Amino acid sequence: MSTTTVRGAGAREWGGLAVLSLPTVLLGLDVTVLYLALPSLAEDLRPSGTQELWIMDAYGFLIAGFLLTMGTLGDRIGLRRLLMIGAAAFGTVSVLAAYSTSADMLVVARAALGIAGATLMPSTLALISTMFADQRQRSLAIGVWATSFALGMALGPVVGGVMLNHFWWGSVFLLAVPVAIVLLVAAPALIPEYRAPRSGRFDLLSVTLSLIAILPVVYAVKRFAKDGFEVPTIAAALIGVVFAVLFVRRQGGLVSPLLDVRLFTDRTFSAALSVLLIGLVGVGGSMLLITQQLQFVEGLPPVEAGLWMGPPALMMFLAAIGAPLVARRVPPGLVMAVTLALSTVGYVLLALVESTGGVALMVAGFGLVYLGLGTIAALGTDLVVAAAPAEKAGSASAMSETVQELGLALGVAILGSLATAVYRDQMDDEISGDIPREVADAAGDSLAGAVSSAQRMPVGLLDLAREAATSGMNTAMAVAAACTVVLVFLSAVVLRHVGVIGGDEPEAGGDVPAEPAKSGV
């Protein structure tokens, strides 16, 4: 597409970007704060190992399940309106999460936060794509948007550590309340409303099919993490696949689909989504395992653990704001490939961490991992949004956020479960019959259980538990390194046709047919 003169963004648009960055900062805070809060949360609510995983990723799975629905709903009812509804709901449910009295109540609250959060991210990203028509300004704005997430992650450990040092674990959820209030007040003045001109009717059957496609797969992943391959696990996965096929077939026959499957014929769109999905799997698993390693293995208090998590998050911050600027001179596929290669080195370093004295190596490795994350979050998201026409901004933004949230949640489930399996296998060989049954069950289930039962365990068993947890993390990070190597190839080869940002880019949306699909039911 040849460049044409477009109206540049003014003070209102950049002010609106600051407002749109607020929920992004909040979600970044939520990620790191919750990981830090897990030990005190576990001590108060006593969740099982399975409940711990649900507390961590119920939000991610539900937000992934509803992002497509909310992205398309925003195109129909108005992106700003949906954003404000979601902000009000998110603030309200955050209060319920803060005062949860049981693990099950917190799981339900986290799931409700996922549904509310599904209205926020696609709305913010889609509004950015409509507010910034100039390609270079849009790329920079998306970089700022991605940087806001990094800023939240950088502030989260420090803010969360201080709060956890003075208040109870539920206080971290209350951070959402003032952010929601500011957004509700400022949004009408600074953010223009946008509604797709030809949005069509909202297809409830497509919504139902999308949920039935995603949720059984969620169940299958969770059950596999706990019990391995069993008949209910396989059946749930097959149900999800069957309904996914039905969902895709229905979308191809609608004039106004929930997800325009023709977007996937654009190789830039498909490749960028693949990089985001697989890349976030490694990040999601590493975030969980490293925060546990710092607190349960190295024995650091929340404030100190939070400070150690700060430098890697700042690496993400620098990458997210710098990558779009570098990509004005260097093809974005090459920028992504180089930083992902550095992330691979980071995963290798994490695979070499030992159970004692490994803090510096962990921070260095995690910093390289986050360097790649910041780059793909900014450039990958920009490539996805640029590949879609303006009237599909909500749908394309929702797809970008869906794969990122699903990647984070899958990382927690898959890599977390892999690390847990290694831990349990090693602990089975170490736990003797002389230990009380409840202590043996707690220590054999998770490192958190071993730490909470330390006073009742034989001398030396806690050290063995820490070594087993470290071995689990090493194994998971080695798998993440292997997957990231694939992403280096994907970015360097499949995305090599993408030109520098601001140049002539015929590939942006060029592979997507201009005419709508035939109507049908």
Image (cartoon, helix red, strand yellow):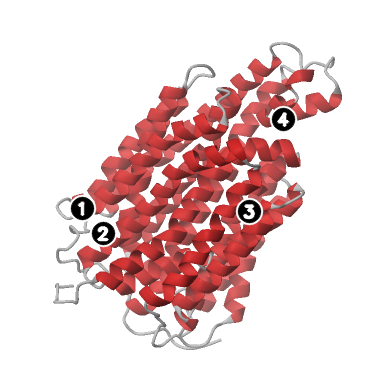
Residue 499 image offset from top left, x and y in percent: 18, 59
Pointer 3: residues within 10 angstroms few (<14), some, or many (20+)? Answer: many
Q: Earlier in the sequence, mark 2 or mark 4?
A: 2
Point out the frontmost of discs 3 and 2: 2
Give the Cα separation between the discs numbered 4 and 1. Answer: 46 Å
- What residue is shown at x 38% (from left), y 28% (from top)? 364
Residue pushed farthest top? 459
- Reading the image, the residue beneath label 2 is 140
Q: Amino acid at mark 4?
A: Gly
Label at residue 185: none
Q: CA distance from mark 2 to mark 1?
A: 7 Å
On the image, numbered disc 4 is attached to which residue?
449
* Mark before the other along the chain sequence, 1 or 3: 3
Q: CA distance from mark 2 to mark 4?
A: 45 Å
**Label 2 environment density (alpha carbons within 10 Å; few <14, some 14–19, many ≥20):** many
The quarter of the rendered structure image containing the C terminus is: bottom right
In which image quadrant can residue 415 be found? top right
Q: Which mark is residue 325?
A: 1
Q: Nearer the N terminus, badge 3 or badge 2?
A: 3
- Placement of the N terminus among the 4 image quadrants: bottom left
Tell me if label 2 and label 4 are in contact, CB under 8 Å: no
Secondary structure type for disc 4: helix
Q: Position of residue 52 (x, y in %)?
A: 68, 42
| Circles 2 and 1 in contact, beta carbons < 8 Å | yes
- At 31% across and 37% down in the image, what residue appears? 341
- Going by the numbered disc 3, the residue's amino acid type is Ala
Cα separation, mark 1 vs mark 3, equals 35 Å
Does dot 3 land on a helix, a strand or a loop?
helix
SS of the residue under disc 2: helix
Q: Amino acid at mark 1?
A: Leu
Residue 315 lies in quadrant: top left
Query: Which amino acid does the dot numbered 2 rest on?
Result: Leu
